[in-house]
Amino acid sequence: MKSLKSAWAALVVLTLTAPAFAGHHGKKMDVVDTAAAAGTFETLIAAAKAAGLVDALKGDGPLTVFAPTDEAFGALPAGTIKTLLMPENKDQLATILKYHVVAGDLGSSALADGARLETLAGIDAVISATEGGFNIENARIVKTDIDTSNGVIHVIDRVILPPTQMSRADAAAAIRAAIDRGVPMFNHGNPQGTVAMYRSVSERLMREGNLTADERARLEIGLMEASNTHNASASAWKLRYALDDVSDSLHGNGQMQTSRQMSR
């Protein structure tokens, strides 16, 4: 009898401590239903509904979701959630939520210090190592590897907000300003200064610019080629070509040329 009571007690303990994320009868649920079952992501789900993203989050995926808890949303400045849930702010809300989602199934083994994750918002989010774990941007990842039928959830303790993006006009102006400063440096025998100038604006555009995928790819190629060129003058040209190509695209001609010469 004592043995039977002990077994029953053990069964009760196991039942009460079963993960809140587990599906019924062991069947995996999708990202949305898994979050709903946990009971601690009500604001996230409401936001996804308001942004029209529920169907995408319930799709085939796979997706990796860095999910802020209700407590994380509650830490936002007063009135922020109410404002974001307004219909006129649907696009802004969608961008913020997409900044928490990465295409692919990225388990905790894929998290590494300095890793840049391309989010569905088109803006990279950076992983950083901390004592005992990882952050994504300024949010601590407090639980990892919650498996779902269409991806994985990592729980975070803050809502991460994408950096303020430069308009396309501002991006074009930033390129023009960099070239206006970089060319005289180059012509007066300081190609290293030109490289620094062009690299700085290229990296800023990658972080903050409202760029197309092709424009981002062009800057990435320019940065990579400049890094692999062990000559400052040649590196300056590589970066200048990329900036010229992106500038043309920003001005709306629809084609990016790749055979320019640096004006002198």
Image (spheres, rainbow, N blue to C red):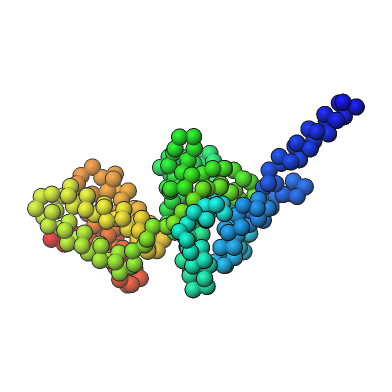
Name the spot of residue 228 as percent of width and height, x first: 29, 44
Residue at the image position 62 percent from the left and 45 percent from the top: 146
Q: Position of residue 63 (x, y in %)?
A: 57, 53
In the image, is 118 to the left or to the right of 204?
Answer: right
Q: Residue furthest top?
A: 2
- Whether residue 218 sits left or right of residue 88 in the image: it is left
Q: Position of residue 8 (x, y in %)?
A: 83, 34
Q: Nearer the viewer, residue 159 or 176?
A: 159
| Residue 187 occupies quadrant | bottom left
- Compared with 223, 260 (above or below) is below
- Residue 239 appears in the picture as rendered: no
Residue that sits furthest to the front in the current view: 78
The residue depicted at 41 percent of the width and 61 percent of the height is 213
Q: How many marks?
A: 0
- Name the quadrant of the C terminus: bottom left
Question: Which residue occupies 72% across, 49% down?
Answer: 23
Image: 55 above or below 194: below
Residue 17 occupies quadrant: top right
The residue sitting at the left extreme is 188
Q: Is residue 131 something that shows in the picture?
A: yes
x and y percent of residue 256 in the render?
A: 32, 65
Q: Quadrant of the N terminus?
A: top right
User: Residue at the location (43% across, 48% down)?
Assistant: 138
In the image, farthest residue toward the right: 1
